Image (spheres, rainbow, N blue to C red):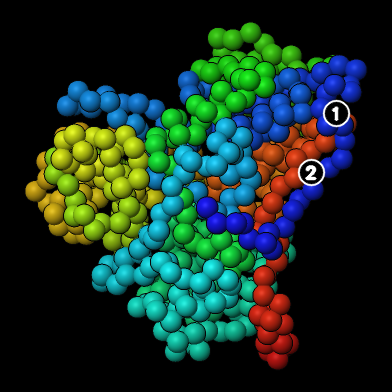
Amino acid sequence: MTAPDPRRERLPGGAGLPDTAGLSRVPTVAVVGGGIAGLAAATGLAERGVGVHLVEAADRLGGRVAGWPESLADGSRAGMNRGFHAFFRQYYNLRALLRRADPHLRALSPIADYPLVDGDGRRDTFRGLPRTPPFNALAFALRSPTFRMRDLMRLDAKAAAPLVTVGVPSTYDRLDHLDAATFLRDINFPDAARHLAFEVFARSFFARPDALSAAELVTMFHIYFLGSSEGLVFDVANANFDVALWNPLHDYLSDLGVRFHLGAAVEAVDRTDTGVRVRAAGAPDIEADAAVLATDVTGLQRLIASSPTLGDEGWRGQVAALGTAPAFVVLRLWLDRPVRRDRAAFVGTGGRPPLDNISVLERYEREAAQWARRTGGSVVELHAYSVTESDAQVRAALLARMHQLYPETMHAGIVDERLLRRQDCPRFAPGDFAGRPTVTTPDPRIMLAGDGIRADVPVALMERAATTGWLAANGLLAGFGLAGHDLYTVPTRGRSRGLRLLAARTQERHR
């Protein structure tokens, strides 16, 4: 692992006592949700000695990054999850969470490159790019088959200025009313490059570019490219998520005294004279001093609707107004013959709907590699975002695209398969940001966390979940008089002073 970006920014955790030994009594917090956000909150609290009850409706940890075993038609056991996840190097707060149980991050392995391939077969790559912005972007543009130097000269400098003058939340103030597709047209970004590069990134938010906030796209470009020297190359879990990540973290938190209540769906959270009461189906009520609500959007809305004592009318309206992104489908196939040896572990695709990416799991996941060695086959995973077709329709279309992209699969037999359709990821549509609820709520005893919760720092996806979980813990720790945890982000504004000055002069000339 390379050293972190020296220009990353520290978010101080706040002063206070090092642990609860100096308090007259030990406070208790109920954390609702066992995904990344809830696990980060539980860790932040338990490490200061706070009593933690973690309540999760599923029978496993990890939330939308959970893993579980499956029995295949050939009698073997296989790992299963909701699909490929990239652990970028600039996910500082998520990686800090994982280091609690895995100090050297041995459960993560680097992916040297992930190509992007469009419908015409043009291929972009991130291999060998310089790490320092903006030279990484310039090198990418110079060697890209879809973005030429003449395209750079044709960009509308004034309209493109937000790409290098990023600030959070100022970027949202300027751009959240626009959709990403309109923004890219306004800056005269070339069509081919837009479809291959930006659209692949946009669909990481499970939405088409015309349904994604331009502010989210620009902030994402800052996080992953112009704002960070960590680059776009990432790590992946080298075993199924339960084995690699969450079982070790469960053991770490158990040693800190965290009490887990798995398979217990929380029905309501009530305010009491001394704190909160958490009511879960099939489990005793939990009395606590405070609570962190770290569920997905639909779960949060359902919980708030059944908890009339929480918050005020305006805040409850903010929660009710949250949206979910369109459905996505993951199709995992256990094939009876291998794909070509030169196939990359992960390939992003453009112009091949409904296929958005394709993974060859035995290239990086232990369970898939063991199955492939034993059978001589391959484990291939196909993703489709923003899906409206039926399962049967999208399955047929995904298989057809796989056969086009990897012709050697045309005559492969399918030993077994799993198709998952989910619609539980947060929406980041134009205009959503201003009304999005934050970590803090009208009641200092209640905190929110999750990748759909507003955080006025440049974070996204799994890192937003982890960051809001740590922030929720810090908010409650401050109320208990305990020290918080330092957090880190990529620079909170455009990294290059020269580019910022150039953008300012360009905007001045066009006034």
Q: Residue furthest left?
A: 411
Q: CA distance from mark 2 to mark 1?
A: 14 Å
Numbered mark located on residue 444 in the image: none
Mark 2 touching mark 1, by CB under 8 A? no
Give x and y (percent) for residue 220: 56, 61
Instruction: Give, as a three-letter code, the residue at label 2.
Output: Gly
Residue occupying image coordinates x 73% and y 34%: 473
Above or below for 401 versus 31: below
Instruction: Give, as a three-letter code, the residue at label 1.
Output: Phe
* Front residue of 122 and 194: 122
Numbered mark located on residue 480 in the image: 1
Asked whether, in this view, residue 221 is left or right of residue 31, the answer is left
Choose top left, top right, bottom left or bottom right for residue 164: bottom right
Residue occupying image coordinates x 69% and y 63%: 7
The residue carrying pointer 1 sits among few (fewer than 14), some (14 to 19) or many (20 or more) residues within 10 Å by Cα, namely some
**Tag 1's secondary structure?**
helix
* Front residue of 478 and 192: 478
The answer to whether residue 91 shows anywhere in this view is yes
Of the image marks 2 and 1, the number of the one nearer the N terminus: 2
The answer to whether residue 206 shows anywhere in this view is no
Q: Quadrant of the C terminus?
A: bottom right
